[in-house]
Image: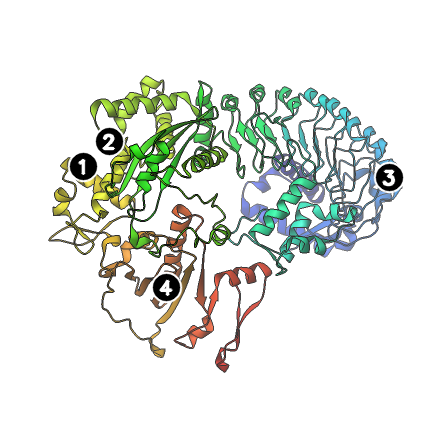
């Protein structure tokens, strides 16, 4: 860009000098006012004497609002989007020596006359992109001064060998043509520095490309390479290399669906349409193959099948087998690239790379490593941590274990630090949580004991188990077929209020229905904790499924695990459950971690691992680290326990903290109270002068608070809208956590366990949960939709954060119905609205029995 601007200013100064002669002085540029005056004078002079000047007035190449004054030859040489089928040649005979640029892009040119390049031998810049050219004349070899050649988006199948005679050619773009191989002339262009050759589905690169000594930038994206030439190791001046594979279809919006029109658009954008034409594939038929329900939309599962097909059809670097790759699968990384000492940018997205090997450490100049969309990628070598990286992109690599997902989600700095620390040593981690959930007195605790027990289970039972209060956390280490698995067993108390109390027998259990509804179910086992029946089969399945989890085998820095051991030792020796962050910083030195930033990263990783709890984003709580997870559970259980009596009607009075947490030190009461707020368990009631109170939504009365919801009158400028949510199953705690998140606007009087009354900016809102499947939000006010969507964002955020996998839909009322103040407006399901938006449907139609419901609404 800088080079281009300097060239443009150079030409401008020459033209001004020729036009103004002795009046062209540097003084004219010292003030903007003088400059504007001179430009205006020059334009007026040319405009009034255009016929005598020998120039032509045309619109600027860059802006239709600007007029340029050019000679006929230069007008012929600068034509964009003119729909020409032949090259204009007016003025070439007189001015050919002065013509350096030939820009005929975005026309409909089929051929280039041979004499064009024979005459215009001083050409420096040629752009013939976005036409329908099938060939380039041999005479191009006469353009010895040519430095740039743009031929992208044409129908070229080859290039003339005479192109190699353009000894000053530095940059060429041949992307999106119909070449099935790299033209033989390309490697012969000895001065070439930049080569663009993307989206042509080429299956191999010639060995001769390794002898392009001056090549600095190579973009060969969207091709079907399975290897790179051995000679690539000789491209020692190469700084930027992009070998992205053929795109598949990615949707970044919330709809997670694709219409037929959008499918066609992406085929064009990704260059797939050319491939389809060459292989006589019908686009409509291709779409229909994946549109299983023939509704004109590819939904998430259908898009998954489409992308799996696209991944497998087109050859790629790396592994494309049907079985999941493992640690013994070849890496697929082109080792020839490891010798490129000056490489700064490397893009290998949309490939089948399995491992980034240790040899990556040889790329000592690498600053940007782009590996996103490699579905088979398992690990990235710790040697990457030794590189001077500024960017490491690893999005959409679902099998990637090293670095782990928890690390990657915290951004580049944490990921880079993690890899650097791996260099000092690492340990393979096979840890997970095992949660036992069910009704009270269903035998969860007995089952946990039975699975751990070896030998006669009858002797291990001690009679009736005490009912679990809260959650019991314990460790279970298993050796299975050479692997050691560490389970953190969470035995949840049975809360029958959260479950359907209808019990079924083994015969009645609808296993097939349940599997169809919840595809994550791995199996059903009928066990006895007394006789041991079914226990071995359950354990074998448990171990098998555990080892299949994508995070099994993650590499963890030895120093970070050493820090964990030091913290555990501190806990056991001092019998403490919490420790200050500053104390951990001091202890980290014993593990060889002296950098405070790395201490934070190590603590955060151990938090993600479940070894400890640190709330780094909370200014008040981050001063301490909970080093015994059971402690948090017990603190929370004191608040919500069925045995707790100090909290009345869901109101926790601060004066009762000593009774609630009688087993804990009083100097931690306020910290623990903030902890309950962090977990969305309680929230403080503002403005309580006499006594301080926190609301505990899950302990509020079941009975609805009495209040009157106002009627809407036509002339009040007050409107009402609502949103109705329908869940397959509304998880326990979701509604109450939403009440906490919305506590800023909550009325502390009109609130009960399944309802809240809100006030915000002259609006009122009512939230209500009905059974385990429905939630309704109603809002009144001048602009009620603003409040409605704020509430929606809160619940949508909660679901994404803590309840992933929960399926729900919601409906919103027809705007026309609301304008007519209909008490029972038509409700549009969000799924229908999303589909309409994706299909770009101009309207949504409401059909009801009453005549005034027969109307249409814009979908956007």
Give the labeled residue for mark 3: 137
N-terminal-most mark, 1 or 4: 1
Q: Are marks 4 and 3 in contact (CB under 8 Å)?
A: no
Q: CA distance from mark 1 to mark 3?
A: 84 Å
Q: CA distance from mark 2 to mark 4?
A: 41 Å
Disc 1, SS: helix
Which residue sits at x=85%, y=34%? 160
Give 620 or 90, whichever is nearer the viewer.
Answer: 620
Rendering quarter of residue 844? bottom right
Give the labeled residue for mark 1: 668
Q: Are marks 2 and 1 in contact (CB under 8 Å)?
A: yes
Give the labeled residue for mark 4: 776
Q: Residue furthest right?
A: 115
Which residue sits at x=45%, y=22%? 422
Judge depth for marks 2 and 3 and give the one in front.
2
Judge depth for marks 1 and 3 and give the one in front.
1
N-terminal-most mark, 1 or 3: 3
Which residue sits at x=58%, y=67%? 842
Q: Position of residue 544 (x, y in %)?
A: 48, 34
Give the labeled residue for mark 2: 578
Q: Position of residue 190 (x, y in %)?
A: 77, 25
Q: Residues within 10 Å of mark 2 (few under 14, many from 20)?
A: some
N-terminal-most mark, 2 or 1: 2
Q: Are marks 2 and 4 in contact (CB under 8 Å)?
A: no
Q: CA distance from mark 2 to mark 3?
A: 79 Å
Q: Residues within 10 Å of mark 1 (few under 14, many from 20)?
A: few
Q: Position of residue 643 (x, y in %)?
A: 19, 47
């Amino acid at each position: 860009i800088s080079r281009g601007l300097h060239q443009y200013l150079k030409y401008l100064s020459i033209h001004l000098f020729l036009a103004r002669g002795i009046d062209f002085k540097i003084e004219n540029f010292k003030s903007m006012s003088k400059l504007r005056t001179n430009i205006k004078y020059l334009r007026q002079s040319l405009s009034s004497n255009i016929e005598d000047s020998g120039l032509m007035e045309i619109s600027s190449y860059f802006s239709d609002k600007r007029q340029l004054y050019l000679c006929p030859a230069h007008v012929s040489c600068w034509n964009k989007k003119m729909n020409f089928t032949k090259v204009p040649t007016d003025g070439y005979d007189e001015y050919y020596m002065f013509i350096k640029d030939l820009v005929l892009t975005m026309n409909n040119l089929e051929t280039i006359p041979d004499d064009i390049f024979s005459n215009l031998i001083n050409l420096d810049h040629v752009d013939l992109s976005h036409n329908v050219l099938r060939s380039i004349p041999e005479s191009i070899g006469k353009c010895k001064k040519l430095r740039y050649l743009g031929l992208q988006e044409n129908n070229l199948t080859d290039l003339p060998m005479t192109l190699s005679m353009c000894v000053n050619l530095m940059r060429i773009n041949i992307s999106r043509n119909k070449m099935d191989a790299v033209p033989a002339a390309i490697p012969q262009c000895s001065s070439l520095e930049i080569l663009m050759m993307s989206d042509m589905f080429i299956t191999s690169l010639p060995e001769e490309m390794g002898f392009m000594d001056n090549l600095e930038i190579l973009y060969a994206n969207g091709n079907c390479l399975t290897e790179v030439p051995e000679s690539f190791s000789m491209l020692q001046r190469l700084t930027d290399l992009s070998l992205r594979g053929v795109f598949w279809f990615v949707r970044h919006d919330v709809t997670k669906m694709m219409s037929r029109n959008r499918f066609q658009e992406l085929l064009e954008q990704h260059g797939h349409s050319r491939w389809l034409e060459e292989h006589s594939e019908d686009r409509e038929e291709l779409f229909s193959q994946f549109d299983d329900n023939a509704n004109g939309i590819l939904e998430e599962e259908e898009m998954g099948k489409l992308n799996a097909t696209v991944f497998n059809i087109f050859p790629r670097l790396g592994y494309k087998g049907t079985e999941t790759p493992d640690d013994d699968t070849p890496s697929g990384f082109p080792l020839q690239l490891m010798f490129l000492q000056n490489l700064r940018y490397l893009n290998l997205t949309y490939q089948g790379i399995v491992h980034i090997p240790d040899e990556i450490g040889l790329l000592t100049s690498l600053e940007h490593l782009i590996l996103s969309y490699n579905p088979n990628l398992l690990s990235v070598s710790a040697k990457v941590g030794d590189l001077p990286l500024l960017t490491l992109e690893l999005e959409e690599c679902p099998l990637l274990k090293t670095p782990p997902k928890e690390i990657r989600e915290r951004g580049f700095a944490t990921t880079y630090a993690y890899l650097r620390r791996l260099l000092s040593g690492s340990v393979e981690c096979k840890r997970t949580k095992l949660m036992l959930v069910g009704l009270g007195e269903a035998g969860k605790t007995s089952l946990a004991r039975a699975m751990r027990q070896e030998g006669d289970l009858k002797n291990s039972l001690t009679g009736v188990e005490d009912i679990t209060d809260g959650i019991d956390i314990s460790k279970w280490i298993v050796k299975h077929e050479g692997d050691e698995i560490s389970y953190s067993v969470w035995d949840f108390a049975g809360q029958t209020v959260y479950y359907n109390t209808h019990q079924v027998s083994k015969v009645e259990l609808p296993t097939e229905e349940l599997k169809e509804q919840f595809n994550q179910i791995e199996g059903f086992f009928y066990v006895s904790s007394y006789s041991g029946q079914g226990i071995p089969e359950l354990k074998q399945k448990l171990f098998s499924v555990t080892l299949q989890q994508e995070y099994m085998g993650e590499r963890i820095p030895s120093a970070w695990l050493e820090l964990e051991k030091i913290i555990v030792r501190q806990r056991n020796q001092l019998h403490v459950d919490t420790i200050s962050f500053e104390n951990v910083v001091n202890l980290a030195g014993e593990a060889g971690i002296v950098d405070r930033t790395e201490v934070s990263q190590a603590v955060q990783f151990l938090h993600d691992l479940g070894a400890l709890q640190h709330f780094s984003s909370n200014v008040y709580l981050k001063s301490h680290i909970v080093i015994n997870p059971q402690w948090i559970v017990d603190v929370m259980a004191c608040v919500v326990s069925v045995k707790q009596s100090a909290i009345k009607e869901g109101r926790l009075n601060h004066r009762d903290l000593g009774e609630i947490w009688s087993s804990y030190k009083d100097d931690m009461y306020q910290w623990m109270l903030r902890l309950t707020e962090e977990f969305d368990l309680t929230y403080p009631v503002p403005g309580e002068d006499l006594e301080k109170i926190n609301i505990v939504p899950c302990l509020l009365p079941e009975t609805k608070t009495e209040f009157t919801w106002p009627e809407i009158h036509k002339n009040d400028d007050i409107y009402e809208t609502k949103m109705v949510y329908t869940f397959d199953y509304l998880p326990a705690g979701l509604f109450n956590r939403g009440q906490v998140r919305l506590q800023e606007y909550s009325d502390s009087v009109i609130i009960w366990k399944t309802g809240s009354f809100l006030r915000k900016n002259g609006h009122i809102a009512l939230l209500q949960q009905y059974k385990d499947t429905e939630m309704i939000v109603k809002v009144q006010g001048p602009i009620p939709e603003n409040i409605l969507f704020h509430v929606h964002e809160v619940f949508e955020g909660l679901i994404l954060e803590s309840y992933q996998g929960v399926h729900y839909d919601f409906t919103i009322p027809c705007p026309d119905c609301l304008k007519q103040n209909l008490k029972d407006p038509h409700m549009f399901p969000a799924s229908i609205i999303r589909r309409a938006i994706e299909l770009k449907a101009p309207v949504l139609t409401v059909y009801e029995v009453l005549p005034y419901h027969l109307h249409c609404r814009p979908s956007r």
